[in-house]
Image (cartoon, rainbow, N blue to C red):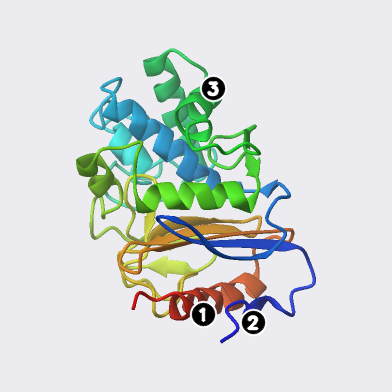
Amino acid sequence: MDTFGSLQDLDFPVGVVVSDADGVLDTYGDTTTSFAWASVTKLLSATATLVAVERGMLSLDDAAGPEGSTVRHLLAHASGVPFDSGATLSAPGRRRIYSNLGIELLAEHVAEAVGRDFDVWVEETVIHPLGMSTVLMEGSPAAGATGSVEDLGALGRELLRPTLLGPELFAEATNVVFPGLSGVLPGFGRQENNDWGLGFEIRDHKSPHWTGASSSPRTFGHFGQRGSFLWVDPDAGLATAFLGAKPFGEWAAQVWPRLTDDVLAAHARP
């Protein structure tokens, strides 16, 4: 089968890296040029935050954000703060409100706890240890990173076989936190169970969704409005990173699920 047949008609540059925990399995397109990661940046920010938790420099139960909110609420988009500005919309733990502002508040809390600018902390704890030589953290910790799909693929391999986080914290981060919360998954509408971990979106049984029909419910990751995604399917033992030069739109909602299913079919474990 043609793993990348769904991409043949795209009229703009894209890069794809498919990995298992041991290395790169397949690539497509421009894998070395830097693209904007948009909200996939949140995976870097969440991982760096969790490294600080792992090292005992802060706690998931630290108060952060609006009254009653904690680091855990901010990571899980359950603090009640709006997308980017304005008054708090809900008490913490009541609704899944996807929020760039929440990640920015989180970054401020982490920076104070670790005694470094947040972007420096991300570089020291995630970017440099994983050898992500093209990645730059600029602007918002919710959406400001740029880098190559090769480097995004390196993050995917780390999330298949973690070295930066211990197994207990990693398991909490990649399973549903505050289950049963409804909310809007950007680009795909309201989900009755808009499941999220600690910075990682959990696929579960969401429909529609940007991953494939054959994706495991345990699949986690993130996509971005600049035409970017990283998913990790722990049951398949695969991760796929995608970066492109065209913003998210109907093309992505059509192409990404098909690409995901083709990757899973081509590289399924025997």
Above or below 90: residue 202: below
Foreground mark, 3 or 1, reads: 1
Cβ–Cβ below 8 Å for labels 3 and 2?
no
Q: Amino acid at mark 2?
A: Gly
Question: Residue 79 location, x and y as percent?
Answer: 34, 40
Residue identifier under label 3? 120
Q: Position of residue 243 (x, y in %)?
A: 64, 57
Q: Nearer the viewer, residue 10 or 134?
A: 134
Q: Amino acid at mark 1?
A: Asp
Mark toward the start of the polypeptide (3 vs 1): 3
Give whichever of discs 1 and 2 has the lower sequence position: 2
Q: Which of the 4 image quadrants contains residue 81?
A: top left
Q: Which residue is mark 1?
A: 262
Image point 20% across, 42% down: which residue? 168
Image quarter where the C terminus lies is bottom left
Q: Amino acid at mark 3?
A: Val
Instruction: Identify the residue at image location x=34%, y=39%.
Output: 163
> In the figure, residue 2 lies in which quadrant?
bottom right
Alpha-carbon span between mark 3 and mark 2: 39 Å
Query: In the displayed structure, would residue 179 be above or below residue 71?
Result: below
Q: Are marks 3 and 1 in contact (CB under 8 Å)?
A: no
Residue occupied by mark 2: 5
The vertical placement of 108 against 131, above or below, is above
Q: Along the polypeptide, which appears first: circle 3 or circle 2?
A: 2
The circle on residue 53 is: none
User: Which residue is pictured at 47% across the width and 37% down the height?
Assistant: 45
Callout 3 secondary element? helix
- Name the residue at the left extreme: 168
